[in-house]
């Protein structure tokens, strides 16, 4: 008769997410996660082969949470309002979940089972961008939008904005992006 498990994969993942949220990826340790769950560190290896596998799962769950936040923000909005809502949700997520966001934006080698989560996030962004731009320009337009949002999030985290570098630059950049994306939808290639 198998013994009842004291934990499961999701419980371990949630504890690791909490630890990364508080202390960043550098502060996350398998021993710390195990201690938070009142488990022996070796118990984690039943669910995650190693630290890299756990990091990949944390990264995938973070992508899933960002996707959910953007999807909720978009709702049933028209194309332009959806892009604005997506941008605001992205920046809000980056502000409110700084350590998880930093992990999401850092080089990571996701495990094969975690790749679909990242693809779903990117597909959602492409889908929203294609509503404003054209399907044929959606990939490059999405990269440009993502770069703008990531840059603004990085500036906010570094406390760069001020009188000489106003945060209104976000709105200016987003409006410029919207104009370029809409113009691309009218171009013939």
Image (tube, rainbow, N blue to C red):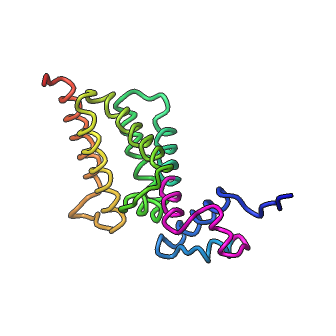
Say if 44 sits above or below 72 in the image. below
Q: Which sits in the foreground, 118 or 149?
A: 118
Q: Position of residue 50 (x, y in %)?
A: 54, 68
- Residue at image x 65%, y 64%? 46
- Residue at image x 23%, y 33%? 181
Q: Where does the N terminus fall, quadrant-wise? A: bottom right
Please give left or right for residue 33 compared with residue 167 in the image. right
Q: Main secondary structure of the magenta part?
A: helix
Residue at the extreme front: 1
47 inside magenta stretch: yes
Residue at the extreme right: 1
Q: Position of residue 36 (x, y in %)?
A: 68, 72
How many discs appear? 0
Q: Position of residue 189 (x, y in %)?
A: 13, 25
- Residue at image x 43%, y 43%? 121
Q: Which sits in the foreground, 62 or 92?
A: 62
Say if 180 sits above or below 33 in the image. above
Please give left or right for residue 52 compared with residue 145 in the image. right
Please give left or right for residue 57 compared with residue 8 in the image. left
- Residue at image x 27%, y 34%? 138
Q: Where is residue 56 in the image (x, y as percent from the top left)?
A: 48, 59
Q: What stretch is highlighted in magenta?
A: 37-60
Q: Which sits in the foreground, 179 or 165?
A: 179
């Amino acid at each position: 008769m198998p013994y009842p498990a004291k934990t499961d994969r999701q419980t371990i993942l949630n504890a690791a997410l909490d630890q990364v949220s508080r202390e960043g990826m550098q502060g996350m340790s398998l021993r710390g996660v195990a201690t938070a769950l009142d488990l022996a560190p070796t118990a984690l290896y039943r669910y995650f082969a190693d630290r890299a596998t756990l990091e990949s799962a944390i990264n995938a769950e973070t992508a899933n949470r960002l996707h959910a936040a953007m999807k909720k923000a978009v709702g049933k909005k028209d194309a332009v309002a959806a892009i604005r809502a997506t941008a605001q949700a992205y920046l809000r997520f980056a502000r409110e979940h700084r350590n998880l966001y930093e992990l999401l934006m850092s080089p990571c080698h996701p495990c094969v089972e975690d790749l679909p989560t990242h693809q779903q996030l990117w597909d959602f962004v492409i889908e929203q961008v294609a509503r404003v731009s054209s399907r044929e320009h959606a990939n490059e337009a999405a990269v440009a939008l993502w770069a703008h949002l990531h840059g603004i999030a990085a500036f906010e985290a570094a406390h760069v904005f001020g009188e000489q570098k106003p945060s209104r630059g976000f709105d200016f950049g987003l409006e410029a992006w919207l104009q370029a994306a809409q113009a691309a939808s009218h171009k013939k290639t």
